[in-house]
Amino acid sequence: MVDLAYVIAGSEATGGAGIQADLRTFQELGAFGLGTMTCIVSFDPADDWNHRFFPVPAEIIAQQMEAATTAYELDVVKIGMLGTPATIDVVAEGLRRQPWRHVVLDPVLICKGQEPGAALDTDTALREQVLPLATVVTPNLFETKTLSGMDTIETVEQLTEAARRIQALGPRAVVAKGGVELPGDDAVDVLLDGDEVTVLATPKVGNERVAGAGCTLAAAIAAELAKGREVRDAVTRAKEFVTAGIEGRVSGKAPFTVVRQGA
Ligand code: PXL
């Protein structure tokens, strides 16, 4: 039997983040991956690598989901960048058509180059339509503040409180990621699974964000869940996988480094 892992996410044309990172992660972790593309992001080297954003039309997203879910018996899905309220509508509708053992949501709210106003719409639509369907959600510090409504998060206690507030919106488990942005020497993430709190801390690898880390973490959680692990084991293994990928990161000619899955 093959462990199938499905991703619904955007393409990022340099391959560091988005569906390219997700599929590499699935492959490295031994899951058979397939994906539905929601949008195409092409950084602009002539404009400080800002994001150019093209949404895939809603009906084409629906067609991709129809093909994938008809071809295979899928029960674990990772959701990455959706980007617009129209995309969120069509993805939520597609997800509601069948039961899922796990829906892992990386709640990507805004990408550079999108209008700030769009983040509010995206936030509302994600909160109302996709969060209630998620079993595991993996917000970074900005997304944790936005979804919990907490302006200040500087300690593990505050991160845990924010995770509780996000859990109240629907998902069984919340991985609130402090990453390099929470003060201190460690990259700290808090897993709240039901009532159980697990603090995951590893020494920070530098103080810069590495592209693709969020995508890779959520994809690794999905791959491990697809292989049958429980949530806590899947998250612990995923954090090890992303930490190794950050240590072995790739540099190219762009002014950012990128996670190397499987390093
Ligand atoms: O890392 C967030 C992210 C997710 N998905 C796509 C992206 C980005 C950031 O650039 O472009 C498609």
Image (spheres, rainbow, N blue to C red):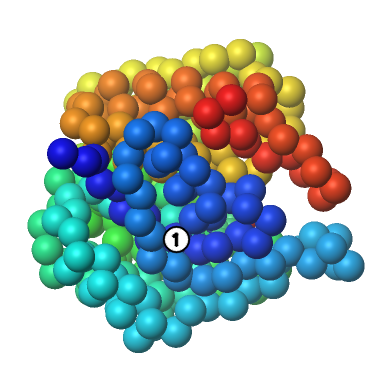
- Residue 222, quarter of the rendered image: top left
Residue positioned most to the left: 99
Which residue does the image show at 58% across and 50% down from the upper left? 17
Residue 193 against residue 201 in the figure, above or below: below
Which residue does the image show at 41% across and 28% down from the upper left? 238
Left or right of 104 in this view: 12: right
User: Where's ligand 1: which quadrant?
Assistant: bottom right
Say whether mark 1 is within 8 Å of ligand 1. Answer: yes
Residue type, label 1: Ala
Left or right of 254 in this view: 155: left
Any part of residue 156 in sight:
no
* Residue density around tag 1, few if under 14, some if 14–19, many if 20 or more, within 10 Å: many
Residue 51 spot, x, y in % from top left = 70, 66
Q: Nearer the viewer, residue 148 or 34?
A: 34
Quadrant the C terminus occupies: top right
Residue 25 against residue 63 in the figure, above or below: above
The residue beneath circle 1 is 9
